[in-house]
Image (spheres, rainbow, N blue to C red):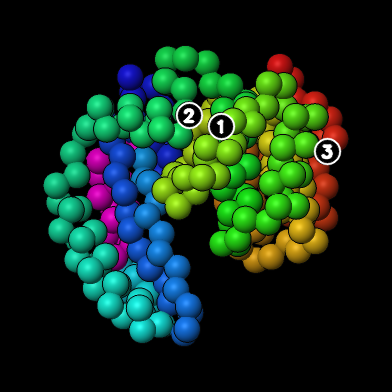
C-alpha cells in the first residue's frame, strides 16, 4: 500500500514507515513539548530522529523543565533510530489516524485541507477561535466537500500531526496547480484571521508552498502569497 506515496523527505524512495519524534523547547519560564509524527522511507525517518536529537542538543535547554525533559527525549530518539525498519502496518494506522486516504485511493482535496488547515491554526502554538471560524467558513466556501469533522479531529490531535510540509509533499503530486494554490490561499487567510501573520505561520506557509508547488516550480506565486497575503485564486472555489 505505501509504495504509492513517495518519501516526503528524499522524494525518491517510497514512504514505508512512520514513528513519533518527541522534543521540548524551553522559553525561560515556559516550555513546549511536541510529539510530531514522521512519515517516510526508513533511512529518512532514522535521519529525522537523529536530526531532532542534534537540534535539541543545541536549543532544547532554555527552561528548568526543558533541562529535565530534553536529555530524556534526546536519548529516546537516539536509541530508537537504529531500529527503524519498514512497517507497513504502522504506516497504514498512521494514515488512517490522520485521515490520509490509502495510496491506491484518489487523494481528495478535502482530506488534505482538513489536516493542513489544522496545522496552520496551531502553527503559532495557540488555537485562536477567529482562525478556527475562518478555516470552517472559507473551507466550506472554497473546497467542495470540506471535511469539517476531519478538521476538528486533526486540531484535537495537533500535537501529533505529521509535519505539514511532509503532508504537502505527499499530496502535492495528487493535486493540480490551481488546487494547490487554492489550498495555499486558504492557509494564508487562516493565518491572517487573528490579525497577526507571525514568523511561525509565515515559515509554515513557505515550507508547505515549496513542497506542494515543487512539481510546477511556481515560486513566483508563492512569493506573492507570502508577501502580500493574496493568491491568484483567493475567493475562488477549487475544482471538484
C-alpha gap between disc 2 and disc 1:
7 Å
Q: Is residue 224 visible?
A: no
**Image vertical order of residue 48 relative to residue 74, above or below:** above
| Residue for point 27% across, 32% down | 90
Q: Nearer the viewer, mark 3 or mark 1?
A: 1
Whether 164 is among the magenta residues is: no
The picture places residue 56, in percent across and down from the top left corner, at 34, 70
The picture places residue 168, in percent across and down from the top left corner, at 54, 39
Q: Quadrant of residue 4?
A: top left
Q: Specify the principal SS of the magenta part.
A: helix
Q: Which residues are magenta?
A: 40-53
Horizontally, residue 181 falls left or right of residue 110, namely right
Q: Is residue 103 visible?
A: yes
Horizontally, residue 40 falls left or right of residue 28, namely left
The picture places residue 37, in percent across and down from the top left corner, at 38, 46
Residue that badge 2 annotates: 99
Horizontally, residue 64 falls left or right of residue 80, namely right
**Image vertical order of residue 180 relative to residue 28, above or below:** above
Question: Which mark sits nearer the N-terminus, 3 or 1?
Answer: 1
Question: Which mark sits nearer the N-terminus, 3 or 2?
Answer: 2
Q: Residues within 10 Å of mark 2 (few under 14, many from 20)?
A: some
Contact (CB < 8 A) between labels 2 and 1?
yes
Residue that badge 3 annotates: 234
Question: Which mark sits nearer the N-terminus, 2 or 1?
Answer: 2
Q: Residues within 10 Å of mark 1 (few under 14, many from 20)?
A: some
C-alpha gap between disc 3 and disc 2:
26 Å
Q: Quadrant of residue 58?
A: bottom left
Q: Residues within 10 Å of mark 3 (few under 14, many from 20)?
A: many
Residue that badge 1 annotates: 150
Give whichever of 21, 83 is nearer the camera: 21
| Residue for point 59% across, 30% down | 149
Amino acid at each position: 500500500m505505501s509504495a504509492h506515496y513517495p518519501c516526503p523527505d528524499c522524494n525518491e524512495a517510497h514512504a514505508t514507515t512512520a514513528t513519533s519524534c518527541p522534543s521540548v523547547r524551553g522559553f525561560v519560564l515556559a516550555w513546549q513539548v511536541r510529539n510530531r509524527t514522521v512519515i517516510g522511507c526508513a533511512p529518512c525517518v532514522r535521519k529525522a530522529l537523529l536530526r531532532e536529537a542534534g537540534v535539541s542538543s543545541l536549543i532544547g535547554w532554555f527552561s528548568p523543565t526543558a533541562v529535565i525533559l530534553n536529555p530524556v527525549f534526546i536519548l529516546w530518539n537516539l536509541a530508537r533510530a537504529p531500529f527503524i525498519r519498514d512497517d507497513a502496518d504502522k504506516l497504514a494506522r498512521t494514515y488512517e489516524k490522520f485521515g490520509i486516504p490509502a495510496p491506491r485511493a484518489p487523494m481528495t482535496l478535502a482530506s488534505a485541507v482538513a489536516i493542513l488547515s489544522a496545522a496552520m491554526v496551531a502553527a503559532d502554538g495557540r488555537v485562536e477561535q477567529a482562525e478556527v471560524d475562518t478555516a470552517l467558513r472559507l473551507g466550506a466556501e472554497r473546497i467542495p466537500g470540506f471535511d469539517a469533522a476531519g478538521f476538528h479531529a486533526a486540531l484535537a490531535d495537533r500535537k501529533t500531526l505529521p509535519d505539514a510540509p511532509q503532508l504537502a509533499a505527499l499530496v502535492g503530486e495528487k493535486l493540480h496547480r490551481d488546487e494547490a494554490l487554492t489550498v495555499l490561499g486558504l492557509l494564508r487567510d487562516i493565518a491572517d484571521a487573528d490579525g497577526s501573520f507571525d514568523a511561525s505561520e509565515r515559515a509554515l506557509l513557505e515550507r508547505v508552498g515549496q513542497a506542494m508547488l515543487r512539481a510546477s516550480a511556481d515560486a513566483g506565486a508563492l512569493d506573492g502569497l507570502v508577501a502580500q497575503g493574496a493568491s491568484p485564486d483567493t475567493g475562488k472555489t477549487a475544482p471538484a
